[in-house]
Amino acid sequence: MRILGIDPGLNITGYGFVDASTHSLDIVDAGVIRPAGRTLEDRISSLFTDLNDLIKEIHPTVLAVEQIYSHYAHPRTAIQMAHARGVILLSGRLGHLPIYHYSATQIKRQLTGHGRADKAQMQRAVMMLFKLDRAPKPADVADALAIGYCCSQHLSTNGRRDQRMRA
């Protein structure tokens, strides 16, 4: 199973392709998409194009994406993230991929044992999990790989008959 984990954002979208088997978990590719353009429409279009190119090139079988969390003091951030998530969900649907959604708390708990881990803790956990020489940077890459890992654990525990949320 090849999982595409995505940490959505309009300025930086982290992605991580993870091959999961019963005995190993390997990184196929990971990085960030930095949508080009000044307007919202340009950045959405750029994200859509770049993400579709990655999906066509690396052929994931599953898409896992972080759910939106909004703090009442920063609603604009959540709205912008929702634009990016919409594009990501559309790309997954057009690629005929099953889509799984995970909260930041779920992902952090899966990797560190508690849901309040900070960015540095997540980067160290991903580094140790994948036996990397150094922590993935920027943190969006580590987050995307963590999402892919979380999905692999979820699917290996629950199989494909879980409570997948449809986009």
Image: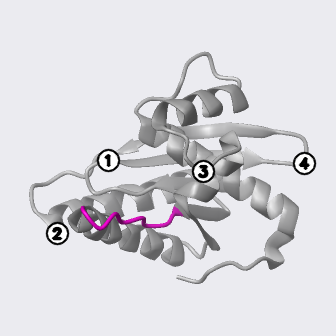
Disc 2 crowd, CA 10 A, few/some/many (<14, 14-19, 20+): few
- Going by the numbered disc 1, the residue's amino acid type is Ile
Q: Earlier in the sequence, mark 4 or mark 2?
A: 4
In the rendered structure, which disc, 3 or 4, sits on the residue that comes first in sequence?
A: 4
Residue 24: x and y in percent read 83, 39
Using the numbered discs, state the Cα–Cα distance from disc 1 to disc 2 in whole angstroms: 15 Å
Q: From the viewer's perspective, tell me whether residue 57 is left or right of residue 70.
A: right
Badges 3 and 2: C-beta atoms under 8 Å apart?
no
Q: Are marks 3 and 4 in contact (CB under 8 Å)?
A: no
Along the horizontal axis of the image, is 162 left or right of 33? Answer: right
Magenta span: 66-73
Which is more toward the observer, 97 or 40?
40
Q: Residues within 10 Å of mark 4 (few under 14, many from 20)?
A: few
The kind of secondary structure element at disc 1 is loop
Q: Quadrant of residue 166?
A: bottom right
> Is residue 23 shown to the viewer in this render?
yes
Distance between the alpha carbons at the discs numbered 3 and 4: 26 Å
Q: Are marks 1 and 2 in contact (CB under 8 Å)?
A: no
> Which residue in the structure is indicated by mark 1?
12
Residue type at numbered disc 4: Thr
The residue to which callout 4 is attached is 22
Viewer-proximal residue among 106 and 19: 106
Decide which of tag 1 and tag 2 comes sooner along the chain: 1
Depth check, mark 3 against mark 4: the one in front is 3
The x, y position of residue 36, in whole percent, is 19, 51
Label for residue 41? 2
Q: What number is the disc on residue 115?
A: 3
Q: Can the viewer see residue 59?
A: no
Q: Are marks 4 and 1 in contact (CB under 8 Å)?
A: no
Name the amino acid, label 3: Gly
Quick one: SS at disc 2?
helix
Gap in angstroms between the C-alphas marked 1 and 3: 23 Å
